[in-house]
Image (cartoon, rainbow, N blue to C red):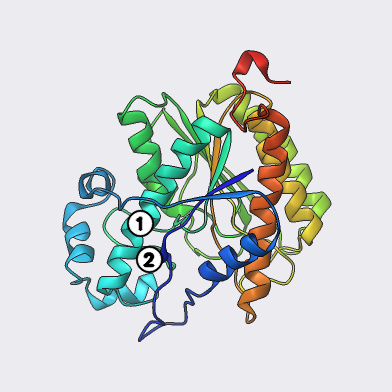
Amino acid sequence: MLHVVHHVDYMAPPPARGTFKFDKYQLVMTALRDSGAAITEHAPDPCPREWLEAVHDPSYVEEVFSQTVPREKERRIGFPVTQHIASRVRHTNGGTWLAAQLAMEHGYAANSAAGSHHALHDTGAGYCVFNDLAVAANRLISEGHAERVLIVDLDVHQGDGTASLTAGRQDIFTLSLHAEKNFPVRKARSSLDIALADGTDDDGYMAELARHLPDVISHFGPDIMLYQAGVDPHVDDKLGRLNLSDGGLTARDRFVVQQARQRGIPIASALGGGYGDDQRIVADRHARSMLAMADENSRWTDPDNNALPKAATR
């Protein structure tokens, strides 16, 4: 069973400026619904303002809520922040929070958007307005759901915003595997950064992931994992520089979920990046990613799709 979070506001009209396309989010859901797999859809509430202000500059939060984001910040984001965008990002942030809650019940759950890992304290960047990963991690700890949160970022681009927003915290660990020469030019410092050479293929990628992720989990001991599951490391991605195949992405996603669930750790994924001229192809990659993770999670749940306790994992 795939528990997936989705909201109608995840889609937005084409921006007046910029090239970002929002139609893939509906196409992802179409692909999931057409797959024949067992799916339960959940609609998130909008993220409360105070949750966003706990991570982002309240003045910037006000700019987004009132649609008064300065033009220079909008250029950095990549599109104008309209009323629809303001509603959208509140729901996508609420979506990652809800996915985390569902993961604690079922072992794994997915947000069909978000993974906005470039958003910084006082501005958005790289198609990201608010950083749902940092917001959710902070709230999980604040509300006592977790003492330690591991954010695994396997988007082709470094999670610079997440690293910056959580820098110095001992209760949040950020792991980023990314293309060394890709955006952003100036990288932040994650808890652990693994910079990959252009053209890294399935074998090279999985060797690095297998070398580092199990050790990070063992040494940090997270209570929950948030996974930025961007599909832009794919060889055909328009903005990627890595050479993962369809099978390589599936192996990556199954490995991440397996490493979490065999230790009894819940894991929630956010969609992350994926770019191409044909949005249906990109949406299919995202859908296959979520379905593969849900299938791997099914090995670690009881017949009613509830997460097995740590003592019962196998």
- Residue 300 falls in which quadrant of the image? top right
Which of the two residues, 94 or 174, is positioned nearer the viewer here?
A: 94
**Relative image position of residue 69 (x, y in whole percent):** 22, 71
Q: In which quadrant will I find the N terminus? A: top right
User: What is the three-letter code of the residue carrying label 2?
Assistant: Asp
In percent of the image, x 67 and y 66: which residue is there?
284
Q: In which quadrant will I find the C terminus? A: top right
Which of the two residues, 171 or 313, is positioned nearer the viewer here?
A: 313
In percent of the image, x 54 and y 56: which residue is there?
271
**Residue on which the image places disc 2:** 9
Quick one: SS at disc 2?
helix
Q: Residue furthest bottom?
A: 16
Residues at marks 1 and 2, CA–CA distance in whole angstroms: 7 Å
**Residue on which the image places disc 1:** 91
Which of the two residues, 8 or 115, is positioned nearer the viewer here?
A: 8
- Residue 216 falls in which quadrant of the image? top right
User: What is the three-letter code of the residue carrying label 1?
Assistant: His
Label annotation for residue 29: none
In percent of the image, x 47 and y 43: which residue is there?
99
**Relative image position of residue 137 (x, y in whole percent):** 40, 38
Seen in the image, is 28 located left or right of residue 236? left
**Relative image position of residue 47 (x, y in whole percent):** 30, 50
Can residue 236 be spotted in the picture?
yes
In the rendered view, tell whether residue 311 sits above or below residue 222.
Answer: above
